[in-house]
Image (tube, grey):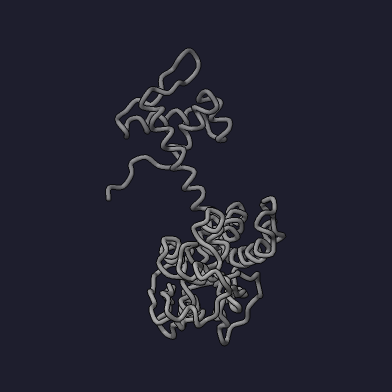
Amino acid sequence: MKAPRVTLDQWRTLQAVVDQGGFAQAAEVLHRSQSSVSYTVARMQEQLGVPLLRIDGRKAVLTEAGEVLLRRSRQLVKQASQLEDLAHNMEQGWEAEVRLVVDAAYPNARLVRALTAFMPQSRGCRVRLREEVLSGVEDVLKEGTADLAISGLNIPGYLCTEMSTVEFVAVAHPDHSLHRLQRELSFQDLEGQMQVVIRDSGRQQPRDVGWLGAEQRWTVGSLATAASFVSSGLGFAWLPRHMIERELRDGLLKPLPLDQGGSRNTRYLLYSNKDKPLGPATQILAELIRRFDAAPLDAPFASPVTSSAKH
């Protein structure tokens, strides 16, 4: 790749000339001589082969080409400054990235709130979010490729923080043959029907969760696919209530009137990587996840500032 001929300092100098309205004013702000500023801009134009400024009275005014290049350069200088800030933060122990793995059934709305609150405190730290199903979260955590993990399973050997529960409801389309029985249902009624099951994404010890006594079973790769199948009349499934509220409201899905087990609550747990200490960014994100997990989903959103972020 060809090395750039113009330096970031030259772009900063040009920006100062334009923003301050002249070479003398820019020199004062940059704490340099006016001749040094004039030479820097003249040398820039020579290197680029394009006139960037023209003198209008006593004021330096951008040419058409100068306006385009200056606009692009502002983003370039901003990114360079952010890169320097990130390097400084990393020197102080601030992470470049936080890796978060989450069970796909955990409410996205809670995550969005936590991540939105994290952004202004992140100091350039990225978040790598990964969704898994059931034991897939456990696999990723044990592989050491996650800093934080949210799972509905107890993972041996790891300490955790309890969080909220998610309700899974047995549902089918209102016209499904189970609903046409028009009475309370037992598990025996389900045995001859098609059950839609979400595939466990884990590779080490995949698990089946929920009643699986149906003679016929379709296994799909995601909760969204399962909801789509069942909403179309293809079988029944236990699905997270928060994911199917619209289908329930629109009459595409209806809870099955089971005499027992029609709904179950799964407690979600927040885990952290036990093989390395949590950095400051990871600690802030973990605190925000806990905070927004405990808040009602319909509560007014206000981005909190943790005490850690003030330092």
| Residue appearing at x 35%, y 30% in the figure | 45
| Res 20 → quadrant | top right
Q: Is residue 248 above or below residue 275?
A: above
Q: Position of residue 123 (x, y in %)?
A: 57, 55
Please indicate, yes or no, whether residue 241 appears anywhere in the rendered image: yes
Residue situated in front as seen by the camera: 26 or 241: 241
Determine the residue located farthest toward the right in the rendered image: 307
| Res 66 → quadrant | top left
| Res 228 → quadrant | bottom left
Q: Position of residue 89 (x, y in %)?
A: 57, 59
Q: Position of residue 261 (x, y in %)?
A: 59, 78
Q: Is residue 108 above or below residue 46?
A: below
Residue situated in front as seen by the camera: 182 or 6: 182
| Residue appearing at x 60%, y 69% in the figure | 166
Left or right relative to 287: residue 111: left
Left or right relative to 19: residue 205: left
Determine the residue located farthest toward the left in the rendered image: 1
| Residue appearing at x 48%, y 71% in the figure | 178
Left or right relative to 19: residue 296: right
Residue situated in front as seen by the camera: 180 or 101: 180
